[in-house]
Image (spheres, rainbow, N blue to C red):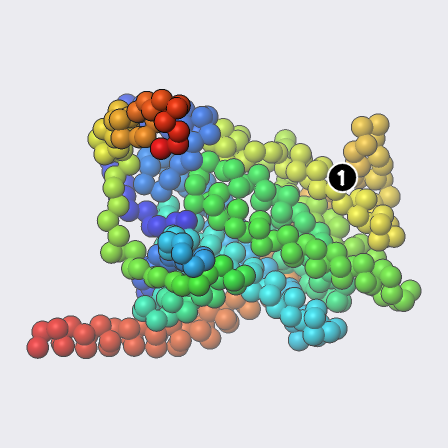
């Protein structure tokens, strides 16, 4: 007999104070409380975290890799968005 | 690290597939990582699901031979370390299942295939752990061989698998060291303890060499896997690397390799005598010393946990229904 499917959660961990939560993996759990407990057991066995977020995977909307060009290429040609585009004479010093 | 496969398989014409396949191979050749939503050949997907899920099953079944000694570990220090190691194996199994799921397989489907005896797991876990020294040998050699296999997998072309392997390898190095420490303690102990260490090495050595899989000329999966950069070294290459690393470690322990034909060649490589591949085939076919035991232990654990899964699902459903009702008010 096939077992009924348990929802999937994405796990985000803040590893140190002052850092952002970072995606570190996924797990199955029936509800948010159990997902949080399982995330603690599965992803922080060696003190990897100070704080955990769990998010139902079904709540994530991802961009399509096929749209990569359309989405990100326009930014590549805009080098004037970077500070190194502009010339500042050496005499002026650090800016 | 993962995220489920959000794509649904789409129908494409054969000509289109050929174009995509060559684009895919070009990406692999350029050492780009393939991610879950990227197009990939069906055979690549199938190979990965098979390999990653077998790997996951191995981690899970691998808890059994060692779990056998948790309550009988000789000291609290050893017990705490063994417990932590077995917990790690469980964690590794779960990372790997998650990686396999990104390819569109469901966890339940994968677990059910293992419980039904339809999916394979590493042949090594079908051998019994008869003495405490076996725990030392498992850490030193079984985990040592696993690390040898897994380090190249950290550069595997499939992103989620490679990332899972990086995490596993980081955690695994403690396993090998704790095993070697057990061996060292036994070998520095009484004559009886040292004999126990030698006996464990004698029983595990050949099955450990078999962990690298059949010799290159007989391996059925290697060619495509190499082309797809899932596999970076051949079975025989990895086996040889492992032997060369292990022999000096055994010499330091003062143990004898249970292979009378082993010799060191001019390049310094230790060459092993013939491996009994018939034994390997028998173990894979389900006729190893513990195959039936391992499967029945997994089935029992799964069946005994059914009420917990059911209760948790029922509770989650009740809470969701109550929230819906409250929202409607």
Q: Is residue A62 left or right of residue B325?
A: right
Q: Residue at x 76, y 59 (%)?
A: B181
Residue closest to the far left: B329
Q: Is residue B10 left or right of residue B64?
A: left
Q: Residue at x 67, y 35 (%)?
A: B236
Q: Is residue A21 depicted above or below B79 in this figure?
A: above
In this rendered view, identify the residue nearer to me: A45 or B316: A45
Disc 1 on helix, strand or loop?
helix
x, y (%) of residue B195? 87, 62
Q: Is residue A26 left or right of residue B152?
A: left
x, y (%) of residue B222? 55, 34
Q: Residue at x 39, y 77 (%)?
A: B307
- Position of the C terminus of chain B, as image quadrant, is bottom left
Residue closest to the far right: B191
x, y (%) of residue B174? 65, 56
Which residue in the structure is indicated by mark 1? B244
**Camera sees residue B180:** yes
x, y (%) of residue B199? 82, 59
Q: Is residue B313 depicted above or below A26 in this figure?
A: below
């Amino acid at each position: 007999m096939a077992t009924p499917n348990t929802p999937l959660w994405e796990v985000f961990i803040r590893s140190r104070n002052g850092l952002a939560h970072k995606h570190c993996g996924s797990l199955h759990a029936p509800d948010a409380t159990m997902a949080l407990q399982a995330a603690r057991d599965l992803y922080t066995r060696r003190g990897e975290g100070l704080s955990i977020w769990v998010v139902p995977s079904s709540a994530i909307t991802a961009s399509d890799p096929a749209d990569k060009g359309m989405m990100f290429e326009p930014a590549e040609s805009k080098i004037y968005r970077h500070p190194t585009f502009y010339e500042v004479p050496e005499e002026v010093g650090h800016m | 690290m993962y995220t489920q496969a959000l794509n649904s398989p789409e129908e494409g014409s054969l000509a289109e597939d050929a174009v995509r396949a060559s684009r895919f191979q070009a990406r692999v050749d350029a050492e780009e990582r393939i991610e879950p939503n990227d197009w990939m050949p069906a055979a690549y997907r199938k190979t990965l699901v098979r390999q990653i899920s077998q790997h996951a099953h191995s981690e899970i079944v691998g808890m059994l031979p060692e779990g056998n000694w948790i309550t009988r570990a000789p000291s609290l220090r050893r017990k705490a370390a063994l417990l932590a190691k077995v917990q790690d194996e469980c964690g590794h199994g779960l990372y790997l299942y998650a990686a396999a799921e990104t390819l569109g397989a469901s966890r339940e489907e994968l677990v059910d295939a293992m419980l039904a005896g339809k999916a394979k797991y590493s042949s090594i876990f079908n051998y019994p752990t008869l003495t405490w020294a076996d725990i030392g040998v498992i850490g030193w050699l079984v985990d040592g061989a696993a690390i040898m296999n897994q380090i190249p997998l950290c550069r595997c072309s499939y992103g989620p698998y490679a990332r899972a392997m990086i995490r596993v390898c980081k955690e695994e190095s403690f396993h090998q060291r704790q095993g070697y420490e057990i061996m060292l303690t036994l070998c520095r102990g009484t004559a009886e303890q040292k004999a126990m260490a030698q006996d464990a090495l004698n029983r595990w050595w050949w099955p450990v060499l078999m962990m690298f899989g059949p010799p290159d000329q007989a391996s059925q999966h290697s060619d495509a896997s190499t082309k797809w950069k899932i596999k970076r070294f051949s079975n025989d290459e990895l086996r040889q690397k492992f032997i060369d690393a292990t022999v000096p470690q055994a010499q330091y322990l003062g143990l004898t390799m249970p292979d009378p034909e082993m010799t060191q060649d001019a390049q310094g490589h230790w060459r092993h005598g013939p491996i009994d591949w018939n034994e390997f085939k028998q173990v894979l076919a389900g006729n190893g010393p513990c195959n039936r035991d391992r499967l029945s232990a997994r089935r029992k654990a799964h069946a005994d946990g059914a009420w917990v899964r059911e209760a948790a699902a029922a509770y989650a459903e009740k809470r969701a229904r109550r929230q819906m009702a409250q929202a409607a008010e």
